[in-house]
Amino acid sequence: MSLFERYLSVWVGLAIIAGLALGQVAPELVNFLASIEYGSVNFVVAILIWFMVYPMMVAVDFSSLARVHERPKGMIITLAVNWLIKPFTMAALGVLFFEWVFGPFIQPGTAGQYIAGLILLGAAPCTAMVFVWSQLTKGDPNYTLAQVSLNDAIMVFAYAPIVALLLGVTDITVPWETLVLSVGLYVVIPLLAGIVTRVMMTRGAANPAQANATVAAFTSKVKPYSILGLLATVVLLFGFQGEVILSRPLVIVMIAVPLLIQSYGIFGIAYWAAKAWRVPHNVAAPCAMIGTSNFFELAVAVAIGLFGLNSIAALVTVVGVLVEVPVMLSLVWFANRTAHWFPAEETAIRAPRTKEQN
């Protein structure tokens, strides 16, 4: 384990402080970087996410990816948690905290927007950062890609109806430019780059084992750049929202409470289900991470479209971004230290059996 990985929580803490300081010291620079976006997708953050996602995409083996369906347990857990549990528990927590627990401490008539922001987050499973969390937990890259791709396909059809049902409105407009652009930037482009890199590196390999060894050596060399991309992303995210955090700390804390309960609760459900069903750890960890993490670009875009740029709902979705990184890193730490709870298996996608093995 590298120095970066061993003390990652320390580096992230320093990155958060650096981001808040950058927002105060150089607000013009931060505003300029924040303005380089389209459809709520910031292109500077997208480039940094490429650095994070690229090593895992190089490790994707399409010959194994085609056999993902042979191991359906992780996929079933992911889909059940993301679409049958998570949106509804987030709505319930929103009502509990902002109608009851925090009701006396917020402005009258604003509870609905707090709840709406939470629902928009809860109904959007992660597309980009989950590749980073999977990589940090030594997740199976083929299975993680398949899980994310299937969730993205379902999100096209299910996101608007679920949000409309929970918000009690019927005019939900999915921001297609955000959805398509995010999938293209965070999945398609780094995947294509990974495929090209893998083909070029393994072209002269004598056998699959040699090819895999070559890929593993390459990804270990570029992995530090992935961690640097994560830290730079944290600096920017907290720099973009530093003024809001420092000016409204109590509101941020109130929003963070249900988000924390939701995140750890959803992870616990998925992780426990994977353990009970004896899913290998390199599938179980990413499986739980996908349900825990959120597609915040989509949530932010819908919140702005429905309630306005300066609305409480939009603020809630932004706080979701800030809460997510520290929470996910704590879950990465937990998952790595509980790997022994799961069946020991090198890969979640087994190679075809030979005649001799049969």
Image (cartoon, rainbow, N blue to C red):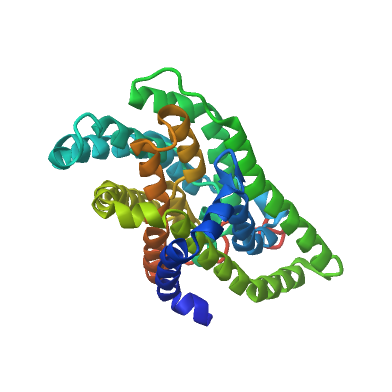
Q: How many marks?
A: 0
Question: Quick check: can you spot residue 280?
Answer: no
Q: Residue at x 58, y 62 (%)?
A: 347
Q: Nearer the viewer, residue 15 or 144?
A: 15
Q: Nearer the viewer, residue 21 or 85?
A: 21
The part of the image, by quadrant, that contains residue 217 is bottom right
Q: Can you give x and y, in whole percent of width and height, for residue 29 in the image?
A: 56, 59
Q: Nearer the viewer, residue 192 or 29?
A: 29
| In the image, residue 67 above or below residue 39 | below
Q: Residue at x 47, y 26 (%)?
A: 160
Location of the C terminus (image quadrant): bottom right
Question: Quick check: can you spot residue 174?
Answer: yes
The part of the image, by quadrant, that contains residue 131 is bottom right
Q: Residue at x 74, y 56 (%)?
A: 193
Q: Can you give x and y, in whole percent of width and height, for residue 151 in the image?
A: 53, 39
Q: Can you give x and y, in whole percent of width and height, for residue 92 in the image?
A: 25, 35
- Compared across the picture, whether 265 is left or right of 201 comes to left
| In the image, residue 300 above or below residue 249 | above
The part of the image, by quadrant, that contains residue 44 is bottom right
* Outermost residue, right side: 204
Q: Residue at x 56, y 38 (%)?
A: 152
- Compared across the picture, whether 154 is left or right of 215 comes to left
- Compared across the picture, whether 101 is left or right of 21 comes to left
Q: Nearer the viewer, residue 347 or 358?
A: 347
